[in-house]
Structures are given as structure tokens and as C-alpha cells.
Image (cartoon, helix red, strand yellow):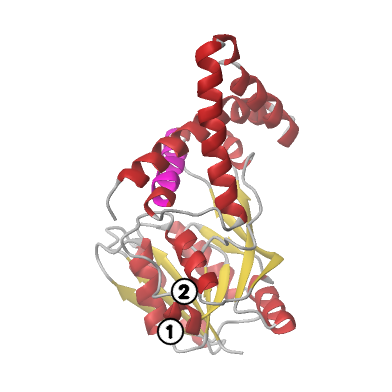
Amino acid sequence: MKITVISTLLNEGNNADFLMQSLFNQKRMPEEIVVVDGGSTDNTVERLKSWKKKFSTKDTMVRILQAEGTNIARGRNLATEQARHPWIASIDGGCTAEKDWLEKLEKKAESTQADVVSGNFRPRSENFSEKVQGVFVRISAKDNPSSRSIMFKKLFWKRAGGYPEKLYTGEDTLFNATMKAKGAKFVFAPGAMVNWGMRPNLKKWLKQFFLYGYGDGMARIKSDTAYGKKVWTLVAGFYAFVAAAIFYPILLPLPFLGGLLYGLKRKFAPEGVIAGILYPLRLLVFLVGFHKGLLTKS
């Protein structure tokens, strides 16, 4: 099995070094790494290029493509188009891979004869704001893997028509659904772990979930996957709650109380309290984004 690792970056600065170092430390080295830079104005490209010679000592070819103005979907498509090997492993900028990430993806693919292997991820949290965000980060869904930790056959990328470039977010959700519709077999490798950097502040964290919702709405996500069922259950629950609260306003504080209890269950610490109180707002901004996406012409 030969594997190309792909990633897209934009103004990642030091994160580019962290990402490349984590790939250099892999127990199972990729045959190739293709990184697309979306038009960085900092030193991201220079940092990436500095790794080429180092990777050559491990017989891994590194290629840096510059494509100013491309979104994540277009960047991933460009990287996959240029990939010289039949398996594609994807990781995002701002993430780092555990040493056995690629090894575990490969072993799972070989043992199950799968076409798509969903990797896993966990939050990388240092300051209080990042710890708040990390409270509700969940493991990857096996039938809707995030492209920050996934491996798939290039064949099924072609059959799916690549990542949908019209979407700014939610592109991997639609890409997964299309590969599944084309007959791809999905499996989950829970130990194939990526550490995911959190947003620099809570305002950007809430914006992130608005964009997630917007992307899912633009993708016209269906309820034929576990993730799709979760989204549409949330939509139905929201309208049911609004209807009930109109007649019984006393219900209005319940989401915040429930969120607080849930946050403390997830993390019995100050960050669990704050995350719990913000949880209903996170759901609300997701729903606002989702409805905006649904109403946007594709």
C-alpha cells in the first residue's frame, strides 16, 4: 500500500512546523506529502519548503503547491489530483498526528478491505478558552469522518467527483455521503489519533459552529447517516422547544440548566461550567447557520 498525505494551509506560521514534525515522526512514513497553500502572507510556505530535504532522508517526497484564494475543498482536490499514490490520508493545518496515526489507518484498511478509514481526533487545549472549547469535542463519526483525520482510496474520490468546491464548510460531510452513495465501505480506526488545535477565542469558536451549520445546510444534508439523523433531530427538537416555550415561558432557562449539567458531566471543572452555559448558544448559532445554508441557492 502506498499513501500520499495531503493538507491545506493558510497563514499557519509555527503550526506548519508542528504539523510537519508530527508527520516526520510517523512510525509508518508516507511515500509522499502534498501540501496546498491557499495564499499565505506570512512565512508558511518558507517553513514548509524547509522540510523537503529533511523528509528526503526518509524517502518521503514533499511537494508544496501554491494556489492563492482556494478554499479547503479546492485545496484538497488540488492535492489529491497531484497525488501519485492510490491511497490518500488527509490532515488539516493546525493539527498534529500521533506517531502511529498513519500506521493504524493502514492496518485498519488492510484488515477490513475498506475503501474509507475514519481516523479520530481530540482537542489540543492549553489556555482556558481552548479548554472550554475542548469540553464538547467528540470522537469522529465512522460514517462521517472529518477530513482532519481520514484515509480514502483515490478511486472513490474520483467517483465522488472530489470535494464539493462550492462549500466553504461542510465539504467533507457531502464528500463522505457521495462516496458512500458510490459504494465505498467505511470503517473506523479509533486509535488513529490527530490532535486538533482549538480556536484562539470563544467568539471565533461560535463563528466556527455557525459556519459548520451553514455548510451542512448548503450540502442539503440528509438523515441517512448517523450524523444526518443527529442534525435533523436537533432541528426538530428546536422547533418543538420553541413551540412549547411560547405557551410555557418558564421553560426558557431549561436549555442553559441542561447545558450546565451536561458540561459538568463532561468536565467537572470551571471550563465545564462555562462550556455548559455556552452549549445552548453553540447549538443555536449552528441552527442559524444551518437554516441560512438551506435557504442559500447552491
Which amino acid type is shown beneath numbered disc 2?
A: Ile
Using the image, determine if residue 287 lies above or below residue 78.
above
* Residue at x 54%, y 60% (from the top left corner): 146
Quadrant of the rendered structure where residue 120 is?
Answer: bottom right
Image label count: 2
Q: CA distance from mark 1 to mark 2?
A: 8 Å
Residues at badges 1 and 2 in contact (C-beta under 8 Å)?
A: yes
Outermost residue on the left side: it is 68
> What range is drawn magenta here?
203-215
Q: Which numbered disc, 1 or 2, marks the residue that appears first in the sequence? A: 2
Q: Position of residue 173 (x, y in %)?
A: 49, 59
Q: Which mark is residue 83?
A: 1
211 left or right, relative to 298: right
> Which residue lies under the disc numbered 2?
6
Q: Is residue 211 above or below residue 102?
A: above
Which SS class for mark 2?
A: strand
> As drawn, is 47 to the left or to the right of 192?
left
In front of the other: 215 or 180: 180
Tell me the quarter of the image containing the N terminus. bottom right
x, y percentage for residue 286? 46, 39
**Nearer-the-camera pick, 224 or 53:** 224
Query: If the image is split into quadrants, where does the C terminus sit?
Result: bottom left
Q: Nearer the viewer, residue 104 or 63?
A: 104
Residue 209 belongs to the span the image colors magenta: yes
Give the label on residue 262, or none.
Answer: none
Q: Residue at x 59, y 58 (%)?
A: 225
Which quadrant of the view contains residue 150? bottom right
Q: Amino acid at mark 1?
A: Ala
Which image quadrant is residue 193 in? bottom right
Position of residue 133 relative to residue 4, above or below, is above
